Amino acid sequence: MHIFDTSIVEQIEMKLIRPSQFSIRDKFNDHQEIESLIVSIKEHGLLQAILIRPYQNSFEIVAGHRRFHACKSLRWRHIPCKIRELSDKQAFEIQITENIQRKSMNSLEEAEAFRKYVQDLGWGGITELSRKIGKSEEYVSHRIQLLKLPQDVKEKIMLNKLSTSQALELTNLTHERVIQFSNHIIENELTIRQIRKVKTVFSKEKIAQSENIFNNIITSKNIKTLKITKKTSLALKITLARLDILIEEVQLTFEPEQSSDIISFLMDLRLKIHSLIDDTIRFRNLKTSKTSRYLK
C-alpha cells in the first residue's frame, strides 16, 4: 500500500475507540488468540500501536482489533494508537493487506473479504484488488470461488479436514457431487493429482460400468489392494486345484481302508481353503465398497 503517511501517534482513551464497520475476520479462533495476546502484553507490554482513523465523533479501528480487545480485557484506560485519515476503501484495503501479510486469515475469510471488496462494495475489480494486496489475480478469483461451496464443505475447510487446494477442485461440481466427493477425498486422503484423475473419468458417461474404468477412479491404495487380493485368491485357487489332484492320487493309489483318514484330512483342508477364498472376496469387496457407494 503506497499511502503518504501523515499519521500521529498518541495515547487514546479506550472508550473513544470502536471496532471497524468492515471487520473481515471471523471469530473462529478469537478467544484463543486474545488469551495468548493478553499473556504477551502482560509480560512485554504492547509492542505495536493499533491503527485507527477519525470517524464521526470517535475513532474506528483499522488494524489491531485483537490487540485492542486484549488491552481492554486488561482494563487499560488508554492505548497507544497511530491515527491516520483514511477513506472507507483505504481502511478496508489496509485491513486485508495486514491480515494477509500476517497470515492470520483462513482461505474462507479471505474469500469473504475479496467478495465484499469486488462485489458488495464495488470498490474495484479483481485486477485492482490483486495489485493492492500483492497477490495474483488467480489467487483472488480462486478464493472467491470457494464461496460457492456448500456450508458443510466450508466447515470441513475451517476444520482443516480439506485443504484449500483440494476444495478448489470441487468448485465446478454439482452440489450433490461436491458433498460426496469431499467425503471421498477426506476418507481416502486423495492428492490433487488423484482428485483430477477422478474428475476426468467422472465427467464421462457410464462411469463404473466396466472394471477398467472403475480401477481408474479408485485411489492407488485401493488399486494395490485389489491386485494383492486377486493374487491371493488366485494362489488359493491353485492350492485348491493341487489338493484335488492329491485327493485323486490317493484314491487311485491307496486301498480304501488306508485312504479314508488321509482323504478326510485333505477334504478338511479343502473346506478351509474355500473359506479363505470367501474371506479374500469379502475383504476385497469391503475395501472397494466405499468407492462403489460414491459412484452411485
Image (tube, rainbow, N blue to C red):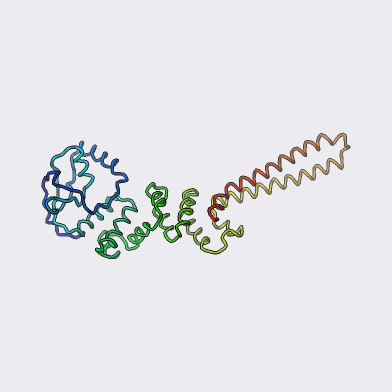
Across and down, in percent, residue 81 comes to 14, 47
User: Does residue 190 appear to the left or right of 3 in the view shown?
Assistant: right
Viewer-closest of 258 and 112: 112
Q: Quadrant of residue 46?
A: top left
For the N terminus, give its image quadrant. bottom left
The residue that appears at 18% across and 48% down in the rendered structure is 18
Across and down, in percent, residue 61 comes to 19, 50
For the C terminus, give its image quadrant. bottom right
Viewer-closest of 182 and 265: 182
User: Does residue 61 appear to the left or right of 187 in the view shown?
Assistant: left
Across and down, in percent, residue 80 comes to 14, 45
The residue that appears at 49% across and 51% down in the rendered structure is 184
Viewer-closest of 20 and 104: 20
Q: Quadrant of residue 55?
A: bottom left
Across and down, in percent, residue 50 comes to 18, 48
* Total numbered badges shown on the rendered structure: 0
The residue that appears at 67% across and 44% down in the rendered structure is 278
The residue that appears at 39% across and 46% down in the rendered structure is 159
